[in-house]
Image (tube, grey):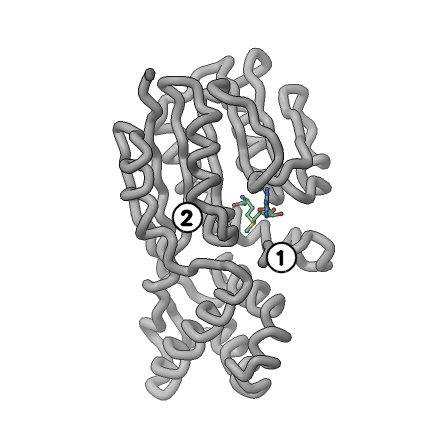
Amino acid sequence: MTYQFDHQWHQERARLAALEAAFDPWSKRAILAANPQAGWRCLEVGGGGGSIAEWLCELVGPTGEVVATDVETKFLEGIEADNLRVRNHDITKDPLEESVFDLIHIRAVLAHLPQRDAILRRLIAALRPGGWLVPVVTDFSSVRAVQAPAEEIDFFDKKFASVIEAAGVTGFDPYYGRRIGAILRAQGLREVCIEGIVLEWDAGHPLAALYRKTFLRLRDLVISNGTLSEEHFQRLQDLMQSPDFYGLSNTLFVARGRKVAP
Ligand SMILES: C[S@@+](CC[C@H](N)C(=O)[O-])C[C@H]1O[C@@H](n2cnc3c(N)ncnc32)[C@H](O)[C@@H]1O
């Protein structure tokens, strides 16, 4: 069981751009709440398209440093910033420094990786005392149609959920977000703050592009295992770009917590 969405797919940068457009404001708000300072050393785990890594580089300035990791680094390598260090790094197993980072951000990564609890422990070990962990984790239980032709509401709610559940065979936990607060507290972090962000979206919202492109990547899986017929797959895709449709998003659990001195 490994991460399913490699960067070789021709629409992957666009899929990540949709994710960034929808979720960057909430990551940035949580990071700013940690009162980041010029000169901080930050770690961006599974940096993907790199929008947050690039923004962190500006935030910490030339006296600071941002280490941005991913198992595929081609998008990160396109960022021009003197204080960015791109690292080809698997967070499940590659070595990681201890007690050095002032802030670690990890978004839309943990739910995908079965080693998620162990990864959080490693990240806390990598923080310096007083440093902040900012995990941003999805939970798909809130996805609903809120305005659509009557016959499509039940169809959307059931079929969208069935695709998300089917992705569980890859090791994906669609409901990990709700557990993040309990895990951070159990790991001894202080000043833990959790916000659950749910957005209304329509065909023009970046979330529609994110869901449609993500489903395209899951198409073979969900059709071959009988989760959806080809006709139902297409009906779901059409609905997500219909001008008559409005939905509620997955809940983005935006968390932060602080490591205390030993
Ligand atoms: C859904 S994307 C999110 C990208 C970015 N964090 C964001 O929110 O915009 C997940 C990212 O995690 C990376 N990833 C997957 N498995 C990883 C691992 N074991 N170690 C580090 N990065 C990983 C993927 O390559 C991908 O870029």
Count of marks placed on residues: 2
Q: Nearer the viewer, residue 62 or 218?
A: 218
On-image quarter of the N terminus: bottom right
Residue 64, given in percent of the width and then of the height, sits at 55, 16
In the rendered image, the vertical position of residue 214 relative to residue 33, given as above or below? below
Which SS class for mark 1? loop
Quadrant location of residue 152? bottom left
Query: Mark 2 is on which residue type?
Result: Val
Return the mark for residue 71: none
Measured along the vertical axis of the image, is residue 21 above or below residue 93? below
Compared with residue 113, is residue 24 higher up or lower down, i.e. above or below?
Answer: above
Q: Residue at x 64, y 36 (%)?
A: 89
Label located before the other in sequence (1 or 2): 1
Indicate left or right for 247 with 47 as reference. Answer: left
**Left or right: where does residue 225 sit relative to residue 184?**
right
Residue at numbered disc 1 = 5
**Quadrant housing the C terminus:** top left
Residues at marks 1 and 2, CA–CA distance in whole angstroms: 17 Å
> Measuring 67% from the left and 30% from the top, which residue is drawn there?
86
Residue at image mark 2: 137
Percent position of residue 121, x then y? 43, 35
Q: Which of 35 and 172 is in front in this view?
A: 172
Q: Which residue is painted at 48% across and 65% down in the image?
A: 168
Ligand 1 has an atom within 8 Å of the beta carbon of the residue at disc 1: yes
The percent position of residue 252, horizontal first and vertical second, equals: 38, 51
How dense is the environment of label 1, judged by Cα within 10 Å: few (below 14), some, or many (20 and up)?
few
Label 2 environment density (alpha carbons within 10 Å; few <14, some 14–19, many ≥20) = many
Q: Nearer the viewer, residue 40 or 123?
A: 123
- Disc 1 marks which amino acid? Phe
Give SS at disc 2: strand
Please state the horizontal and vertical placement of residue 239, each as a whole percent of the image: 48, 77
